[in-house]
Image: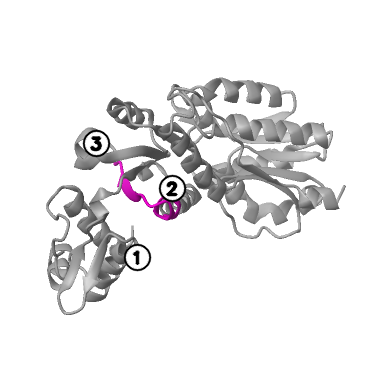
């Protein structure tokens, strides 16, 4: 989180906990600088953020005050468990959160962003004004977090969760991706396939365990390689190299079930141009990526993160308005397939 956002969240917490009320003057820039150990520029930027969110107003010569109407607004809690995310997954998570915050602000609600850290107690750390929350959007929220939040009987919509359970989930990641991959295999009549997957994916205790086993069993009729998640990147690259070198045929397609593998082996594709220039590459990418160029026939399966944020708010508002029951599972498909190179070279 940027320092200016920390300043904004600090002042918001004072408001939400009742330490600052309607019409109260917020701490001065100097006080914020001392409390949070930030520069004057950062303190001012944090205050300006709250002004843009219509939470405070500044009176020339008097200071900044909590606006009279700000505490009458309901707010939506955004839950994020970033401690379990790395690399592009973390970037995707933050992109969704920013889109959610913008969308919530546009609707006149106050977005409250809560990061749940490992071994934390959600019930103690969430805002005291949880009773004023009209709904919760969980981004990468765990079963443990959602179980605790459900005790408040507040509408919950879960974004990017791989299992629905009793919650209204807008995305079951793996079933959607596998369905897309299966459609690509059938569409292009792919027969000679090499598949790379991370074994850790098969060890989940959620509903998608069965999807993983079923899909991997389906791919075993082709040529599959499982890479243990505990292995380091050089080891994973070595497994990839060994497999490609041992092939007695030119594959129609190579499937990377996890984008971690693809992103790490892509730099060495050039070593195998004799094979890969004539092979379709299918990869799952959960966020926005660098340009891979047009040297290879790459089909990307990725999520429209902005659309996911939009849909999650729409679904949450439907739940709030009682348009569907609390425990009804909802599936939407924000998966985007980039087949342009496939189309051009077929």
Residue at the image position 14 percent from the left and 65 percent from the top: 27
Residue 221 % position (x, y):
74, 23
Point out the tag, 2 or 3, that comes first from the N-terminus.
2
Q: Judge left or right: residue 56 versus residue 251.
A: left
Q: Residues within 10 Å of mark 3 (few under 14, many from 20)?
A: few
Q: Which mark's residue is nearer the viewer, 1 or 2? A: 1
Q: Which mark is residue 86?
A: 2
Q: Is residue 255 magenta?
A: no
Q: Quadrant of residue 226?
A: top right
Residue at the image position 65 percent from the left and 60 percent from the top: 291
Q: Judge left or right: residue 329 versus residue 223.
A: left
Look at the numbered disc 3 and give the secondary structure of its residue: helix
- CA gap, disc 2 and disc 3: 33 Å
Look at the numbered disc 1 and give the secondary structure of its residue: helix
The reply to whether the C-beta atoms of the residues labelled 1 and 2 are less than 8 Å apart is no
Point out the tag, 1 or 2, that comes first from the N-terminus.
1
Q: Which mark is residue 326?
A: none
Q: Which residue is mark 3?
A: 131
Above or below residue 235? Residue 319 is above
Part of the protein shown in magenta: 102-117
Residue furthest bottom as drawn: 61
Q: Residues within 10 Å of mark 2 (few under 14, many from 20)?
A: few
- CA gap, disc 1 and disc 2: 31 Å
Q: Which residue is mark 1?
A: 52
Question: Closer to the camera, 211 or 136?
Answer: 136
> In which quadrant is the N terminus drawn?
bottom left
Q: Judge left or right: residue 55 versus residue 184.
A: left
Q: Can the viewer see residue 174?
A: yes
């Amino acid at each position: 989180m940027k320092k200016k956002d920390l300043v904004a969240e600090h002042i918001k917490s004072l408001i939400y906990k009742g330490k600052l009320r309607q019409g109260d003057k917020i701490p001065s820039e100097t006080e914020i600088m001392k409390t949070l150990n930030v520069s004057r520029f950062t303190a001012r930027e944090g205050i300006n953020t709250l002004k843009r969110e219509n939470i405070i107003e500044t009176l020339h010569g008097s200071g900044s005050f909590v606006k009279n109407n700000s505490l009458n607004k309901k707010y939506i809690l955004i839950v994020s468990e970033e401690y379990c995310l790395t690399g592009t997954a973390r970037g995707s998570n933050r992109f969704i959160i920013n889109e959610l915050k913008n969308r919530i602000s546009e609707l006149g609600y106050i977005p409250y962003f809560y990061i749940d850290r490992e071994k934390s107690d959600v019930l103690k750390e969430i805002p005291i004004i949880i009773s004023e929350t009209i709904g919760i959007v969980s981004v990468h929220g765990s079963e443990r977090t959602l179980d605790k939040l459900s005790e408040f009987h507040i509408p919950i919509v879960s974004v990017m969760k791989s299992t629905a359970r009793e919650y209204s989930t807008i995305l079951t990641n793996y079933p959607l991706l596998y369905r897309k991959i299966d459609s690509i295999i059938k569409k292009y009549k792919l027969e000679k396939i090499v598949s790379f997957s991370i074994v850790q994916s098969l060890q989940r205790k959620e509903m998608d365990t069965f999807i993983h086993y079923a899909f991997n069993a389906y791919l075993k009729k082709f040529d599959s390689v499982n890479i243990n998640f505990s292995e380091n990147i050089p080891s994973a690259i070595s497994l990839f190299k060994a497999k490609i070198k041992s092939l007695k045929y030119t594959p129609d397609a190579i499937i990377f079930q996890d984008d971690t593998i693809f992103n790490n082996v892509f730099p060495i594709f050039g070593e195998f141009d004799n094979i890969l220039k004539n092979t379709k590459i299918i990869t799952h990418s959960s966020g926005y990526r660098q340009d891979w160029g047009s040297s290879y026939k790459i089909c990307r399966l990725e999520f429209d993160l902005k659309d996911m944020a939009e849909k999650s708010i729409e679904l949450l508002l439907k739940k709030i308005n009682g348009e569907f029951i609390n425990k009804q599972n909802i599936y939407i498909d924000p998966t985007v397939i980039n087949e342009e190179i496939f189309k051009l070279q077929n």
